[in-house]
Amino acid sequence: MSFDTLDLPSWPATCRLTIPGDPQSKGRPRVYNGHGITPEATRKAENRVYSEWRRQYPDLPPYKGPVAITLIFWTMTRRGRDWDNLAKLFTDALNGVAYEDDRQIIDANVHVRRPDMLVLGARGPRKRKTGDPLTWHGNPYQACTQAIINFQQEYIPIKED
């Protein structure tokens, strides 16, 4: 049997996913009587990511090979959140659905976009106020999480005759 005749499910080379709303960080589990409990807000945020993946890619089985991921977190506030906690929530939520395990991620790019500190007012630049539109480098945006997931192909040596 040659590799060409194997009946393997086909994956797109790239999947894109956008989760509307302010990105959430992965919360620390609370330990009660020796058992770790994931915070409710974390479970809800992970479920939103999982549900959006299932909505957009309902028939795509978890990928078994290496994965490269780019995450862009467009936040509503300038309040600092660690990029790794934002990414952890997202990548954990896709375990078993987009890929078998997040250990398969071999390349990751993470970007956090916080609103500009200054906006253009009637008399020039001024400090951002509540209700001002969200802008990053002067360009408007909506708070969301964007992901680009690339399914990498494993190298398969071919014997030449």
Image (cartoon, rainbow, N blue to C red):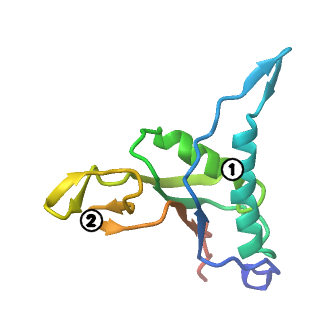
Q: Quadrant of residue 153?
A: bottom right
Whether residue 89 is visible to the viewer of this picture, yes or no, is: yes
Taking 76 as reference, is 30 above or below it? above
Question: Is residue 34 placed above or below 28 in the rendered structure?
Answer: above
Report the front residue among 127 and 47.
127
In primary-sequence order, the first of circles 2 and 1 is: 1
Circle 2 or circle 1, nearest the eye: 2
Disc 1 element: helix
Q: Quadrant of the N terminus?
A: bottom right
Tell me: 93 left or right of 19.
right
Tell me what residue is drawn at x 73 percent, y 84 percent.
4
User: Residue 138 — which label?
Assistant: 2
Quadrant location of the C terminus? bottom right
In the rendered image, residue 89, in percent from the top left (x then y), is placed at 63, 46
Residue 100 seen in this snapshot: no
List x then y, in percent, for residue 33. Answer: 86, 14
